[in-house]
Image (cartoon, rainbow, N blue to C red):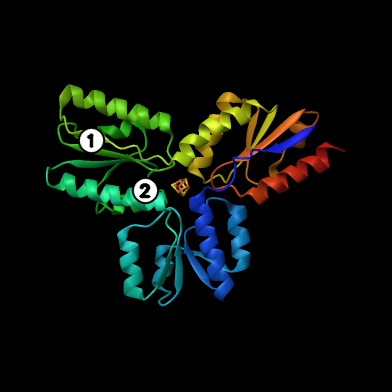
């Protein structure tokens, strides 16, 4: 029996950068607040909480004037920066550079659309922190499309600029672009531009995952239940390797399902720490090899 960890699995550089910023600050003061979970992985959140990182929401920040608060890789809307300034909160801004560039692009698109009565459309998960930050660039006026039905909110006679949350599925985004293209061809504007704003770390990951998933007999996909990237990649793995299961921690391992298997693979989302996959590997070896 062999148990292998996907060499391409682990945190993306945006998350690595945010965690490094948190660890550096905690090394200096042991007092740091973070707006929301630094990463959608409870195990890693617990590890950092043991080092002193305290997760807060926007309301709690109001009661912490003068505190030091980390902005995670997902980014924040302009209103958060304004609130921090008003409260004298020191921000450590660990927004991923790719998300920052997308925020800027949307801001510019919003300005351009304002002058021609156009619309900014964002393909993303409603209520997701990154989407809230992106929508904030348009004074919360963007149309958020999460499901195919949501395109009914778009006025196809008016100009449209379309962007995607960085961690969305490329296939679904392409389908959405086709649907909007068909709708504008039938009833409206010739001024429709769709930008490719899915993070290459996410879109390339799917192809890398495919060959890894095919190379094993059972695939353990490690991800927090609240990671949208995790759900997308898990569904992707299931299509090429039906013997795939998603778990969040070693306690959820089903050893009966793994016993007697020739080659077991372990992989995860861009928010899954490598140390957790290593722990899971050790658990499988210690139980299944005896
Ligand atoms: S998935 Fe891409 S955009 Fe999102 S935090 Fe990671 S590197 Fe940045």
Secondary structure at numbered mark 1: loop
Q: How many numbered badges does the structure rendering display?
A: 2
| Percent x, y of residue 156 | 19, 31
Q: Is mark 2 within 8 Å of ligand 1?
A: no
How far across and down, in percent of the image, does residue 251 sit? 71, 46
Mark sitting on residue 154: 1
Res 152 quadrant in image:
top left
Which quadrant of the structure image shows residue 169? top left
User: In what quadrant of the picture does the N terminus appear?
Assistant: top right
144, 95: nearer the viewer: 95
- Along the line of sight, the residue nearer the viewer: 165 or 149: 165
Question: Against 46, is 271 above or below?
Answer: above
User: Residue lying furthest right in this view?
Assistant: 290
Task: Classify the position of the C terminus by image quarter.
Answer: top right
* Rendered residue at 31%/40% (across/down): 163
Tell me if label 2 and label 1 are in contact, CB under 8 Å: no
**Would you identify the image quadrant in which residue 66 lies?**
bottom left
The residues bearing labels 2 and 1 have C-alpha atoms spaced at a distance of 18 Å
Task: Evaluate whether residue 30 shows in this view.
Answer: no
Q: Which mark is residue 131?
A: 2
Using the image, determine if residue 220 lies above or below residue 31: above
Query: Which residue extends farthest left?
Result: 116
Q: Residues within 10 Å of mark 2 (few under 14, many from 20)?
A: many
The answer to whether residue 98 is left or right of residue 139 is right
**Discs 2/1, front:** 2
Q: Residue 265's spot in the image, x, y percent?
A: 68, 34
Name the spot of residue 238 as percent of width and height, x first. Answer: 58, 28
């Amino acid at each position: 029996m062999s148990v292998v960890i996907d060499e391409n699995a682990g945190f993306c550089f945006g998350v690595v950068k945010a965690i490094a910023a948190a660890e550096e600050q905690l090394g200096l003061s042991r007092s740091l607040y973070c707006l929301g979970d630094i990463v959608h992985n409870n195990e890693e959140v617990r590890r950092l909480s043991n080092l002193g990182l305290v997760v807060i929401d926007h309301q709690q920040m109001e009661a912490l004037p003068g505190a030091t608060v980390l902005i995670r890789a997902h980014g924040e809307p302009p209103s958060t920066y304004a609130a921090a300034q008003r409260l004298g909160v020191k921000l450590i801004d660990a927004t991923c550079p790719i998300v920052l560039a997308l925020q800027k692009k949307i801001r510019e698109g919003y300005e351009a659309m304002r002058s021609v009565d156009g619309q900014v459309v964002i393909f993303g998960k409603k209520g997701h922190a990154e989407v809230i930050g992106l929508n904030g660039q348009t004074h919360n006026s963007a149309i958020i499309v999460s499901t195919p039905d949501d395109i009914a909110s778009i006025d196809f006679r008016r100009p449209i600029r379309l962007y995607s949350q960085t961690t969305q599925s490329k296939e679904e985004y392409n389908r959405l672009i086709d649907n909007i293209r068909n709708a504008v061809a039938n009833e409206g504007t010739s001024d429709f531009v769709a930008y490719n704003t899915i993070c290459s770390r996410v879109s390339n990951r799917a192809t890398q995952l495919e060959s890894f998933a095919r190379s094993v007999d059972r695939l353990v996909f490690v991800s927090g239940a609240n990671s949208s990237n995790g759900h997308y990649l898990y569904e992707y793995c299931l299509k090429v390797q039906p013997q795939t299961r998603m778990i969040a921690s070693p306690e959820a391992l089903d050893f009966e399902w793994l016993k007697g298997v020739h080659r077991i693979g372990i992989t995860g989302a861009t928010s899954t720490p490598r140390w957790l996959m290593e722990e899971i590997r050790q658990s499988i070896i210690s139980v299944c090899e005896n």
